[in-house]
Amino acid sequence: MSSLRIEPTVADPVAALKATVEKPFEDARAMPPAVYTSAEVLAAEQARIFARQWICLGRASALAKPGDYLTDEIAGQPILVLRDKDGEIRGMSNVCLHRMSTLLEGRGNVRTIVCPYHAWTYSLDGSLRGAPMMERQSGFCKDAYRLPQVRTEVWEGWIYATLDADLPPVAEQFADLTPMIARYGMADYVETFREEHVWNTNWKILAENFMESYHLPMLHRATVGPHSKLEEMECPPGLPAFNYHWITKEASLAIGNAHPDNTRLEGDWRKTTALLALYPSHLITLTPGYFWYLVLRPVGVDRVHILFGGGLSPEFVADPRGPEYMATLKTLLDEVNAEDRRGVEAVFRGVSSPLARPGHLSHLERPNYDFARYLAGRLG
């Protein structure tokens, strides 16, 4: 009687990943399990990817008025992004320069930034405005204090930030993508909801799940699966900063195709959906009538923080039935997300097991292969 042999844990997951991606796509396999479960890999991802790349923080429309802010964290650095009094979007450290408390939480609107610990107060440009009773300290000079600035840029309506002062502009990073999606007018899409969640899986498993459509007929058989024609789907090779594929279909929901008032899209583009994976962790489904997105941030090998949002094209927002369309979209996406959560948490349980083995990828998982090559290049 034969039995399965439990192989030892991979000593060097990154080396195993590099060996995996050196194979041609025709013989490509899924990433080694240890790439998802290793704490050392996660530490390398934080240091070599998240700390050195452009990271999406959401839609610029979320900061509509001076003083509107949002908070986030990049590779362990708390940051805040706000619209300043001149109407510009500005990023800075979200850590007080006194005893190093974090300053703001969540989202909101402020006239000044006040530390909740000792009430040191900063202007919207990060300069120190007031420090109670510090005038008694002869060595203290208020003008010497200013919150460290964090580079932020807006591309296609998205806010991006980076801790790397020398990284090329975000528009340059996605220069190849911009003309490919220009006809949609994504910058003008209106966000109608934004939420945050934490799931019990590795961030890369969720990223891969979003990138490929091979799972749609099965995992999403109760929602979008029946409308997915895999035999008509092509997944072209990805580019260095992103991967993508297209789905052309007659949508079951009105918002899935272009609104009658949409004059930007013609022919098949009026019913074509773009699925975009912008490295490292910004994932967008862009349809002629709506969009939705995930922004992923690892909080452990087994947990991922998710920024989840979506909205409609301007024509559907302006339609008298706009509120109805917004509610329909949210209902659909909540159902799809629930299905995805069950799927990706099951995958993490699987890759964490001693008998886990990566199998061959299908032609519809070309984006996963390109994502693995991106990771290997950054971690190597």
Image (cartoon, rainbow, N blue to C red):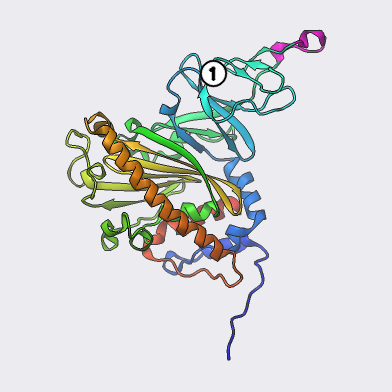
From the viewer's perspective, tell me whether residue 184 is left or right of residue 378: left
Q: Residue 340: where, in percent of width, then height? A: 43, 54
Q: Residue 62: where, in percent of width, then height? A: 44, 28
Query: Which residue is depicted at the point 38% across and 42% down?
Result: 292
The image quadrant of residue 221 is bottom left
How packed mark 1 is, by other alpha carbons closer than 10 Å (few <14, some 14-19, many 20 or more), is: some
The quarter of the image holding the N terminus is bottom right
Q: Residue 63: where, in percent of width, then height? A: 45, 25
Query: Which residue is depicted at the point 50% across and 61% down?
Result: 346
Using the image, determine if residue 225 lies above or below residue 97: below
In depth, the one of 278 and 312 nearer the eye is: 312
The image quadrant of residue 224 is bottom left
User: Is residue 292 something that shows in the picture?
Assistant: yes
Q: Residue 291: where, in percent of width, then height? A: 34, 41
Using the image, determine if residue 337 lies above or below residue 81: below
User: Is residue 370 something that shows in the picture?
Assistant: no
Find disc 1 in the rendering and name its residue: 110
Q: Which residues are magenta?
A: 133-144
Using the image, determine if residue 47 lies above or below residue 57: below
Number of labels in the image equals 1
